[in-house]
Amino acid sequence: MFTPMTSTIDKPAKAIILYDSMSVGGSADRLIDSMGKNLAEAGAYVEKARCKTNADYRFVEEFDLVLLGAPIYYLLVASKLSGSLSQSNLRAALKGKKVALFVICGSPEPMAQFLYLPQLKMHLDNPVILAEKAFSPAETSDSKAIAEFTQNILDAYGKAN
C-alpha cells in the first residue's frame, strides 16, 4: 500500500523520467510508473520518455528534475540510454540540471554502486545529482523501496532550491 509522502518542494516541479528497457510492460516500466505516481502525488508534474540514441533532447530544458535510469544487461547500462548520453545532445541538455539516477540489476548494491552507476555519471556534464539507487529485481515492485527513493529525491530537490 502506498503511504502519502511529505514534500519540501516549494512549488510543483516539472519532472521527466528518461529511461531505456528492452521490454514493454516489464519491471522497468512498472518501477518508472510507480516513481512517477509518487512524484505526482507529491505535487510534481511528471512525464516519461524512452530514450532514443539520436533523438533531440532540447525539450529536457523545460524540466526542473530529470530521472535517468535503465536495467543492466550483460554488465552494461541499457544501450539506448548510454547511447543517448554519448551520441545525442542529452548530455548538453542535462548540464546544471537536477538529476536522479537509478539502475535495475541483480548485482549486490556495492557492486552496482561501483560498476553501473558510474556508467551513467561518466557521460554527465556537471549536473546536480540529487539521489542514486540500484534497484534489485525484487525492489522494482517494492512500494516501500520506491517511496523511499522518491522521497530522497524530493528532499534533496527541496534542499537544492
Image (tube, rainbow, N blue to C red):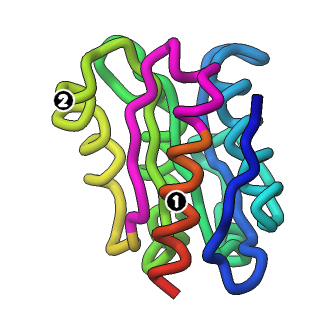
Whether residue 50 is situated above or below residue 139 in the rendered picture: below
The answer to whether residue 32 is left or right of residue 144 is right
* Label 1 crowd bin: few (<14), some (14–19), many (20+), radius 10 Å: many
Is 137 in the magenta?
yes
Among the two numbered marks 2 and 1 on one chain, the one whose residue lies closer to the N terminus: 2
As shown in the figure, which amino acid type bears the numbered disc 2? Pro
Magenta residues (range)? 129-146
Q: Nearer the viewer, residue 144 or 65?
A: 144
Q: Residue at x 46, y 80 (%)?
A: 159
Q: Residue at x 72, y 25 (%)?
A: 30
Q: Position of residue 116 (x, y in %)?
A: 29, 33
Q: Residue at x 26, y 53 (%)?
A: 122
Estimate the spatial distance between the alpha carbons at disc 2 and disc 1, rounded to whole Å: 20 Å
Whether residue 67 is situated above or below residue 70 in the rendered picture: below
Q: How many marks?
A: 2
Q: Nearer the viewer, residue 83 or 47?
A: 47
User: Looking at the figure, which quarter contains the N terminus?
Assistant: top right
Answer with the quarter of the image where residue 158 lies.
bottom right
The answer to whether residue 90 is left or right of residue 126 is right
As shown in the figure, which amino acid type bears the numbered disc 1? Ile
Whether residue 95 is situated above or below residue 123 in the rendered picture: below
* Label 2 crowd bin: few (<14), some (14–19), many (20+), radius 10 Å: few
Callout 2: helix, strand or loop? helix
Picture disc at residue 32: none
Picture disc at residue 153: 1
Callout 1: helix, strand or loop? helix
Q: Position of residue 84 (x, y in %)?
A: 52, 47
The residue at which mark 2 appears reads as: 110
Q: Residue at x 82, y 55 (%)?
A: 41
Q: Position of residue 106 (x, y in %)?
A: 37, 12
